[in-house]
Structures are given as C-alpha cells and as structure tokens.
Image: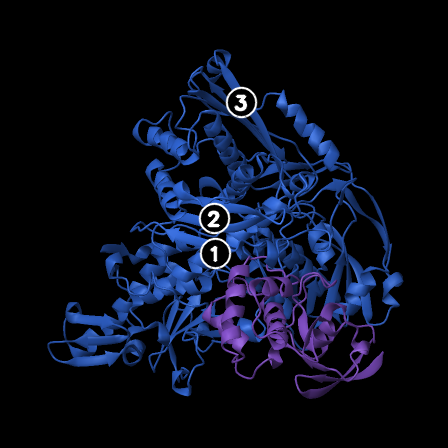
Amino acid sequence: MATYTTKLDRRSFLKVSALAGGGMMLSFSWLAGCKPSPEQVLELPKEWFELNSYIKIGDNGVVTLFSANPEFGSNIKTSMPMILAEELEVDWKMVLVEQADFWPERYQRQFTGGSQGIRQGWTPLRTAGATARQLLINAAAQTWKVSASEITAVSGVLEHKATGKKAGYGEMAALAATLPVPEEVTLKDPKAFTLIGTSKKNVDLEKIVTGKPLFGMDHQVEGMKYAAIVHPPAFGMKLASFDPSSVTSLPGIQDAFAIKLFKEDYVRNFFDTTTFPELVAIVGNSTWEVLQAKKSLKATWEKAPESSFLMAGFGGSAPSPIKVPSGLESTEIHQSNMDEYLSKPGTILRKDGDPEGAFKKAAKVIEKTYTAPFLAHNTMEPVNCFAHVTADKAEIYGPTQAPEFIVGTIAAALGLPKEKISIKLARMGGGFGLRAYSHHMVEAALISQKAGVPIKMVYSREDDMTYGIYRPSYRATYRAALDEKNNLLALHVKAGGIPESPIHPNRFPAGAIDNYLAESWQINSNITIGAFRAPRSNFIAAAEQSFLDELAEVMGKDPIDFRLELLKRAETNPVGENNDYDAKRYAGVLELVREKSKWNSAPAGTHLGVAAYFCHNSYVAEVVETVIENNKPVVEKVVAAVDCGIVVNQDAAVNMGEGAIVDGIGNAFFGELAFKDGVPSKTNFNSYRMIRQQEAPKAIEVHFVESQEDPTGLGEPFFPPVFAALANSLYQATGKRYYRQPFAPQLEMENLSM
Amino acid sequence: MATITLSVNGSSRQVDVDPNTPVLWVLRDHLNLVGTKFGCGMAQCGACTIHLDGTAVRSCSLPVSSVGNSEITTIEGLSEKADHPVQQAWIEHDVPQCGYCQAGQIMSAAALLQENPSPSDEEIESAMQGNLCRCGTYLRIKAAIKTASQNL
C-alpha cells in the first residue's frame, strides 16, 4: 500500500460546475459481448455530483469516468478509466466512460504518444480514484457519525459493519462532493486489484460495429460547408499564384482562397511541423464537389528558396533556427549522400575503451550496412478537421494526439486569445505519431474564419500521403572486431538519416562490450519528418538486431545465447555509465520467448528468427517463424514476450501487440516512399503497398512477464523488434541476409513470390 | 444536378446531387449515414464497403446514378440492435483498435458469409484481401468471421 499526497495533482480536483449535466458522448461499459437486456441498460441519474475532474457520480450510483487523453486505437479510453475504477472501488458494470474535451485547467498531459498514457497516468489516475473513494467514505462517516476508518468501500457500496449501516455511492455522492479533498489518500496494494489485470472490452465497441459517428470525419452541424486543400506538387515548391475563378464557377463551389498558417513573428513549437505553410483552400457544398474541384484549380507553383524559422525544442526548450534547404530532392541523390558517410566520420556520441585500437589488432572485422526508406503513416482516416470560428471564439473538433501543442498555434493564427479556442477530441482513425502534428486544425480554423461559416476540411488520400511528416530515411553501418578465436573485441556503429540520426547511444549493446563506439550524422532535407511508431527505434533495432544475428553466426553461437551472454556482462559488470536499460529484465523477455517459441525444437521446414529491443520503458523479444509455401515466404507465427510491468487490460494489451507485429511485418516487407525531383513516388494504396489479410501472420502469441512493477507503455515497444526477427527468420529460410528495407524487392529477385 | 431516388436500409430516400457523385458521399454528406467511411477514393482500401442487393461493393467508386432500383445496405442498416452475427462476433473478439476500417470489414464479412456460410481460412483471406486495417487487427477479423460462421 502506498500513501499519496493529493497536492501533486490539485488541478484534477478543481470543481467546475459547468460540467455537471454534460454527458453527451456516453459509452457504456456493460458491453460484455452479449446483447444487453433492458435491465442491464443503465438508468441515467436525475443529478450528477462531481468528485473531481475525472469522476462524477449519479444519485442512483451510476459513475461517469472521464477519459482525458485522445484515443487513437491503443484503447486508453477503456484502460485509463479502469485504473480510476479500480481505486474508486466501483463495479465496472456501473461505469460510463466519456471522452473529455481538451481542458488543461482540469487535466494534465492530454497527450497520446510515446507510449506514455498508462505510465504517466498511473499515479494521477489511481490518486484521483482513491480520493473520490475517500470522499464517499468521509461522507458516510459524517452521516452515520462513525469513524471513517471503520467504513469499507467495495463495489460501489459503503458499509459500517459494527452498526450494520450500508449505502450505495449514489446516496453519499451529494455530500461527498461538498467535502474538503483529503490531504492524503491510501492507494490499493496491487495484489488486491480486482479490475486491473482483467480484460475489459473497448467502451466504444458497439458504436464502432454499428457505424455511429465517432470520428472527426463524421462530424456535421447545421449550415456547415466543406473544404478541400491544394498543396504544392513537390517538396521544395511553393505557391506562386492561382486563379480562384477556375473553380468558383463549378457547381457547388463557393470560394477559393489561400491561407498562411504562420504570422511572420510566430515562434513554432516542436509539434508545429508543417510542410506547406501556404495552401489553397476550396470551400463548397459537399465533400465530393470540393474534392473534384481540386482537379480544376489553375495554380502556378515555384521553387521555394532556402528559408528558416524559429522552433522550440522537444519539451519546450529554447527556440533555435531551423533551416529548410531549397531544391527538389530525389532518392537517388539521398542514397549517394548517405554513401559518403561510409568513409566520412560522424559525431561521436559514446566511446568506451579503445575501439580504434581493438579494430587495429582484430583478426577479423565484420562490417554490414542497413538502409530503410521514408515511410508514410497512412492512417485509415485521412487528415481532416471541423472548425467553427466566429469573431470572438473558435470551436475545433478533430483528430489530434496533442491538443496542448496546437492550441497556441491556432490562437496565434486566428488572432484570438488561447482561452477562446475550444478543442474537442474526436476518436482518431489511427495516429501512429502523425497526429501529434496538428497543422490541419490550424488550416481548418483559418478556412472557417475566412469563409465565415463552420467547415469540415477533408484531405484526399493523395493529399494525405504526399503531405510529408514521414518516418525518416535511415542508414546504419555496424562493425565488429573479432580475435582469432572469434571473441568479440569491439563494436562500432555509425548511423544517420535524412534528416535525423536513429542512434540511442546508451542503449544495449552499449554497456556489454569493452570497446564500443557510436557515431551519428544527419543530412538536412526539405522533406518533413515526424514521429512514427517508436521513432528511431523502429530502424535502429532492425539494424542492430540483424547485425547481432549475423555476428552470433560468425562467432558460432546461438543467437539467443549470444544476446544473453552480452546481457549477463551488462548486468554483472557493466561497461561505462548511463546505460539506460535493465539488463535483467531485457534477458527475462529473451528467456521467456525462447521457452514459448520452442526455440530449440522448431519443426523441420520452419525457420525461426529472433530479435529483442527495449524502448519506451518496455522490453520486448520476438520470434518470427516463416515457412516457404508454394515459393512464397509465409509468416506462420510470431511469438512475443513482453515486460511492461503490470498489465492493465489484458486482452487489449494482446490486441496492441498483435497489431504492432502485423504493422512491423507489413512495413518490413512493403513499406517505402521514394522521391523524384521532390515528388513522392506513391500517392494512394494502389501503389503504396500495405499489409493485407493474406500476408498477416497465421498466428501471434503475446506473453507477458509476471510483474508488480508500475506499468509502462505498449503502443510502440512491440514494433521495433519485428523487422529484425523477420529478417533473421528469412535468412534461415533463404540463406540470404536482408540489409535493405523493404524486403519484398530482394525476395522477388530471389524468385520468390510476394 | 439530378433528383435520384434510392432505397437505403429499407427506406426510400430522395437526393438532389450530381449524378456522378459516388454513393459514399451521398450517404455521408446528404443522408447523414456516416458509418460508411472514406479511406482512399479508388476502391483500394474497403473502408467504404456497402451492400448492393447483398453484394459487397466499394461505395467510393460507385456513381449514384448507376444504383437504379438496387437495395443499398449500410452498416447502420445491417441490424437493428447490433445483433447481426458478424457484429456480435466482432464484439466477442473485441476486434477494433482505432475502429475506422471496421464498418467496411464487417460489411465485407457479412457479404462473404451470406454467399458462403462456412468459408475456409483461404476463402476468408481472399474475400477480405480488399479491406485494409492499418492497426493490423487481421487475426481477430479472421477469428471473428469463423465465430460468426458458427452462429449464423
């Protein structure tokens, strides 16, 4: 049991009466897989009593829990309220979940990204739940004139055993809401959890399967108009001029105008990445009409000169100038620019021992280079946003992972105070990092302001895929020095990318090797990049874990044994300082995956590959099993072992793992975006190949390490190891190593069908 | 512009639109049936799947003028109370992550089972190949279709 002072999180306990009586977007948690009988349908109470920002209780005992973070599919809208309900001690069947609006006065960190929702929400949500429970107990103590310490709270019922007094939460909620917030509360012992660790279904499940409006794309209001945008046809280009009459004469089109996202003196924040700060907007009566009109717009585009702007760093550090180079870039040039770093030195990020000396006296040096292309996020819901801007306020409704980072941008663009911008959080049709950059909210707001009506702006798939904010292109060269007996003397990694390096210098295998050198480099570009599921890790894990596989083979060791030996060294006698992983937990997932995948007894004809990685505070090891069937590599099975501490919602966590593994296999086989003279090579799903039902693994198993540690994230950590586990498995199947992502072209060259 | 009468989810609906307008946008913008989703606009992702006389079609590439007297069924019309066996199976397997593609997946699955009540794994994979799920819920989709097949 732990005691937490509630002062840590005072703003959760602010009472804002305007909220009472809200409840427009209720989600019923009783959806347990069967059709609800009439008596299961919760009666809405006559009155709600708010105990803090996250919890309100009705006079009939029904509880509304607010989910503060935006939902993009990782299921936090269910899992985070489960944490509240656990400490509140309420029956999940009595719970309604409501998506909170962006409301920084009431909620901390309404940000979905970096796999941090559960990890950073853990203590605040437990505290909020426990505080509300204590308020109800205190109300009962006052009413019954007994000591609060003698009252129990279980499943929404308060009881004083000695006097036999009993009351439901609903009976005490009115009084509880008026009592002072306790200074300290006691959190439950994790061993006593009854809800956390079970499987609860997605609270929006029934709405999803019946097609109810949930997404920004679905939002409609009376008098709303529709808007499309036209952006420059290539990176490195900008708008020169356009002729509005080329579209305003078309049926259903009302107006066409240019919008500029930033005023001259605006200092951008880290998430203000915007590829095309000036766009043409077309406003009309229907989505179809505005999307059609895009094709008729007469516009001239010109090469953009080199430019620069001020941008604050991640976490709000001091702004620095960001330079946008001029030019129309091509993948071919990118590749040759990256080739130069095979011989050019990089910036040293970490050096242990004497790596240069070790390489000089090595009997054998192994050197391998790994490459990955730009990737588009390709969320199923294209970029869109609703905005209604009037003279004195703006209402925004749309998909965003990071409302707190765009509210100031919208305010500055519109010339309105921040307090006059309201952002409602739509369920997102996928995020994967893309929607941390909410330029679309600024665009929609500017269009509504100029058009003077509420509008819904919709990107076509082509706009979405060619807009930028991609996963960067990366390159990594790994070198290992071995002595005559194939003992590992030194490891050297030099890696970079366009425009950022993927290296995390203090991660494994740093700490496990006496002589270690990590160098980075970067090449600037006008192709914009952004977070993409496990940024940087999603590439460097592929390179590192493929290289370790190859190294193990040369050293004559089993790939898992080899990793475990390195981890043993890091655990018992670590090299250097600041190693940012727990070697024992790392080894734990490898040991678990070895057991669960039957690593040592794979049936004939099946080919196993392993990889493990630590990122976003969680440890994941994966074994991919491929077979060659009718001349086609088929992923039969993937087994994952995970250490993420306590698992909040078991089946939802498994779902997340399955999805990330499918995503990884898809991107490893097919994901690729190339450029020619600044123009992306692919614009829609007819050319951008995505993994589909037939290519998905036939089975996926997800195993969690039993743990009482506080929970860490799951959205990202499953993703990075997939690439190398697949490459290592394909090596076993084909005898060829896979250094260049995506793998499908090489497999086709080997006359396998993909 | 033309006045077109459509039969949607068992009701007769009249719309005044450009006859080239895809059914997707007629449903979404004119009839306020937003369960059918826009994903790609070129019949590549399946998010817009509806039934036309019981057959799965991609509504983003179907001009409204070509529908004629055919009966349109959308996700909103698949059942009255989320009790179609496919919807029930989706709930049982807690299939969705973001949920955006799932209406299209469900409509494709329902059409498959209508035609072939006991599909093999290969038949499921083949019938569902046109529906993208960026979250990667393919295994649950397949498992849910098998469950639905048993509960038809």
The picture's colour for chain A is blue
Dot 1 and dot 2 residues touching (CB under 8 Å): yes
| Quadrant in which residue B99 is drawn | bottom right
Mark 2 = which residue? A718
The picture's colour for chain B is purple
Please name the residue shown 28% across and 73% down the image: A155
The residues tagged by marks 1 and 3 sit, at their Cα atoms, a distance apart of 37 Å
Disc 2 crowd, CA 10 A, few/some/many (<14, 14-19, 20+): many
Disc 1 crowd, CA 10 A, few/some/many (<14, 14-19, 20+): many
Camera-nearest label, 1 or 3: 3
| Image spot of residue B94 (x, y percent) | 47, 67
Q: Amino acid at mark 3?
A: Ile
Q: Chain of mark 2?
A: A
Q: Amino acid at mark 1?
A: Met
Dot 2 and dot 3 residues touching (CB under 8 Å): no
- Given residues B24 and A444, the one toward you in this image is B24
In the rendered image, residues at marks 2 and 3 fall on the same chain? yes
Q: Is residue A636 left or right of residue A392?
A: left
| Residue A267 visible in this rendered orientation of the protein | no
Mark number, residue A366? 3
For mark 1, give the secondary structure: helix
Mark 1 = which residue? A656
Q: Mark 3 or mark 1, which is nearer the start of the sequence?
A: 3
